[in-house]
Image: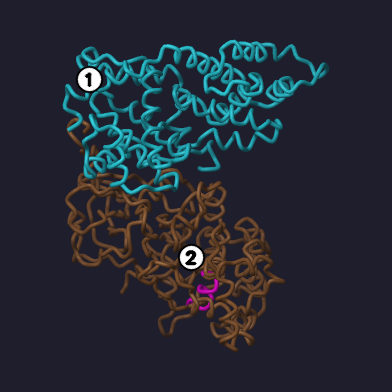
Chain colours: A cyan, B brown
Amino acid sequence: MAANYWDSTQRANWTFSKAQLANIRSELEAKDRALVSQYPLPERRHLNIYFYHQFTKLGRRMSLRQQPLATAQVYLRRFYTKIEIRRTNPFLVMATALYLACKMEECPQHIRLVVAEARNTWPDVFLADTPKLGECEFSLIAEMNSQLIVHHPYRSLTDLQGNFSLTQDEISLAWSIINDHYLTDLPLLYPPHIIAVTAIFLSVVLKPTQSSLQVHSVGVSNALQALGNMQGIGASGAQSRVQKLVNWLAESSIDVEAIVDCTQELISLYEVWETYSEKDCKDKVHRFIKAKGLDK
Amino acid sequence: MLSGGYTSKKRVMERYKIIGFISSGTYGRVYKAQGKNGEVKEFAIKKFKPDKEGEVQYTGISQSAIREMALCTELNHVNVVHCVEIILEDKCIFIVFEYAEHDLLQIIHHHTQPSRHAIPARSIKSILWQLLQGLLYLHRSWVMHRDLKPANIMVTRAGEVKIGDLGLARLFYKPMQCLFNGDKVVVTIWYRAPELLLGSRHYTPAIDLWAVGCIFAELLSLRPIFKGEEAKMDSKKTVPFQRNQMQKIVDIMGYPTKEKWPLLTSMPEYNQLQSLLASTPRVHRPIGLETWYTSCLKSNQYPSNSSVDSPGQEGFSLLSGLLEYDPQKRLTAEKALQHPYFTTGEKPSMNCFEGSTVEYPHRRVSQDDNDIRTSSLPGTKRSGLPDDSIVGPAAKRHKAEDRMWK
């Protein structure tokens, strides 16, 4: 449950291996061959970045905090493991996911307000009214089997930050890294505490000097090296904070391989981010919406 | 829109045969049903209706329905009502539960009939034990129930106690906004903890333990221990001080003091409490919980010594630990389960009917309205605003004392 990720539906039903996830997606695409080839989509992470920006735009109008945005992103990701994206209007699905996430995260927004703000945010592609959003809510909940409670890494971060006496800068960098992980498949692949530990590790290794969300990949590869050398590090020697963290990792039963993998996924995200083009994403998404009349 | 719109992959009528109507409340209606796949199992199907009567369009699902759906699918404990599946069909939500033949309200009611006796002491012990086990599970899962009352506590034919109706339950791990902002009014008035009555904004799971205390007292005496009258919300939607309810508590428990409850003076309604003290001299001569308890045992003919047939002095000690004014000193579910009331003498049974010869009537199921597909029948009128409204307070759940034998 909320306190217990181990008994949660998230762990039981919404955490996949990479192979499973790839399978689910290729089966979904196989059912809609023509559609898929007719409307190519941007690289998945670019699309996620684009959707994240759209969520943020809508969320800002309603002065929402990070948590409902994070939950909404997870809903979107889960929904699109069940439904081919080109059969939907992603803007409607996003507005609905956010409406639902707000109720789940105890900051409810009136449905009419969400519809009005979505129309203002996306005047070209969002023409839906309240009944449409309400109908979409039914789809969203049904596809997710009413499993709406999402465990986020933010809480593990809060719980763990004391252990490592993180500075304010490090905490906010770790927080940003957690925000970024929603742009990857990581929320569908790993438990929240693994993500939190990865974010803490990176924030300590990288020494948050840069204010930008994007982290230098050089720093990250240093981090990876530190992880790789874990076995070699003894109890003696200078107890730098990085080493202390590495020792902690070695002593805890945490899956270090998972942390290495998460780190790599994040580096790769930051590399891919360099070539992100909002226009390209927008064009490709708008194209299938318009062509199939999904905005009506 | 999604191409094609929404159609349910599961159909209620294909999977279940509706046997009859059980009850209705603010949320909608509950039906008794049987599985259609040849299994003899029985179910209770809770149908959430659209906010407006006869609504033909989707209007968004109320926050309490969302909470209940999410919690039901996540929770899994023998003392929490088990959800079999959820079906979203024709703009309605159907939550399918395992059927429970009885509930505590009905059991208490059965014993109040003339010529009947008190509830056997070992049944009460088993009921409390199971109730607290379920509550411990909820609290460990960071779920506050917020609406515990006899009508919401189910009992199966096998004597298993199951906490039901999670419509007001919510997670309490580091709430983003203080709990008070969400639902201004929680817990049916008779079971409402003093910190809620005094306007506390950051209340805790301790409110559920106060309710357990009230339920314990009601099982012993067969009537609500603090049966106050509710002050209604005025037209400005401000929450009134529940003076009469506070009075009922003070009549028995005495006036709370800041010596015993250090944070008392910082309660928003503290001034109201003082005016209550000033205006009613009776509060200076409370009955006292111990006197109440002793005379309750006597009038219901429980032996005064501790034995299997009496809750005894341990029962009093547990009750006073639950009906503790200061929420920080009140017993937690975990501590209550370790109380000598449970640990000394006979071990509590997981079947509350064990050793009892009382035959309880079956849940009344009416045949007049067993069409689950129609929604605009009387008795489903919703009171208060839907609680996902940004302006309105919570639906006034406490108004609906959904008593099924009425």
| Residue B33 in the image: above or below residue B353 | above
Q: Which residue is mark 2?
A: B353
Q: Amino acid at mark 2?
A: Phe
In magenta segment, residue B333: no
Does A132 sit left or right of B171 as displayed?
left
In front here: B218 or B123? B218
Quarter residue A126 falls in = top left
Image mark for residue B75 = none
Residue found at the far bottom of this picture: B281
In magenta segment, residue B223: yes
The crowding category of the residue bearing disc 1, from other C-alpha atoms within 10 Å (few below 14, some 14 to 19, many at least 20), is: some
Q: Amino acid at mark 1?
A: Arg
Measured from the top left, where is residue A137 in percent x and y? Answer: 29, 40
Residue at 38 percent of width and 32 percent of height: A55
Image mark for residue A287 = 1
Q: Which residues are magenta?
A: B215-224
Looking at the rendered structure, the secondary structure element under dot 2 is loop
Asked if labels 2 and 1 share a chain, the reply is no
Does A286 sit left or right of B63 as displayed?
left
